């Protein structure tokens, strides 16, 4: 998966776990000048149009008692770093376009062609040619 590959060598981030079935990557960001580290969850969901939707949640490892409410922009930086790395990694992949699926069956198409032939709009040769094309012959 491109996401896992993109995050594998990011400085300051460690892959904690990856759920292949659910397409969830769990990362940990290390301690920095502005934080005690963050837990990051990246989720990939498939969309109907063939694209993917990515959701990133970056939260401080510490709670409210230990300064976890103020992140000095560290969570936003984590998200931007991951998105940039993923964007670069995806450049190495070929984009696949999803074929549009017809709601009509081949049989329905042949019936329509037969009607056009009966009405004299198509000749017998045109009908046979289109029928073979639809049947993949």
Image (cartoon, rainbow, N blue to C red):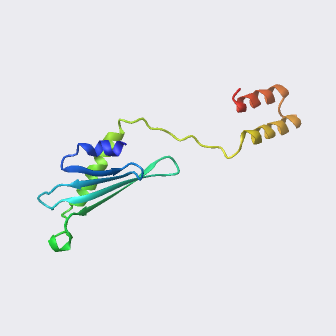
Q: How many labels, in total?
A: 0
Residue pictured at 84% horizontal, 27% vertical? 124
Q: Is residue 59 above or below residue 113?
A: below
The image quadrant of residue 38 is bottom left
Residue pictured at 84% horizontal, 39% vertical? 115
Q: Is residue 122 above or below residue 82?
A: above
**Percent x, y for residue 106?**
72, 39
The image quadrant of residue 91 is top left
Which is nearer the eye, 19 or 105? 19
Looking at the image, the residue that sits furthest to the bottom is 65
- Judged left or right of residue 33, residue 132 is right
Residue pictured at 28% horizontal, 50% vertical? 82
**Percent x, y for residue 108?**
76, 42
**Percent x, y for residue 73?**
21, 61
Which is nearer the eye, 113 or 41? 41
Looking at the image, the residue that sits furthest to the left is 33
- Judged left or right of residue 47, residue 12 is left
The image quadrant of residue 70 is bottom left
**Percent x, y for residue 30?**
17, 55
Q: Is residue 95 above or below residue 50?
A: above
């Amino acid at each position: 998966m491109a996401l896992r590959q993109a995050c594998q060598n990011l400085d300051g981030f460690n892959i904690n776990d990856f759920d292949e079935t659910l397409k969830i990557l769990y990362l940990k960001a290390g301690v920095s000048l502005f934080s005690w580290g963050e837990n990051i969850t990246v989720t990939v969901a498939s969309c109907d149009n063939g694209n993917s939707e990515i959701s990133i949640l970056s939260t401080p490892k510490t709670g409210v008692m230990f300064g976890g409410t103020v992140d000095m922009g560290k969570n936003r930086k984590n998200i931007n770093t991951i998105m940039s790395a993923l964007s670069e990694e995806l450049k190495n992949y070929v984009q696949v376009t999803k074929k549009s699926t017809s709601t009509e069956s081949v049989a329905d198409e042949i019936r329509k062609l037969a009607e056009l032939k009966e009405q004299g709009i198509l000749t017998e040769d045109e009908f046979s040619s289109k029928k073979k094309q639809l049947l993949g012959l």
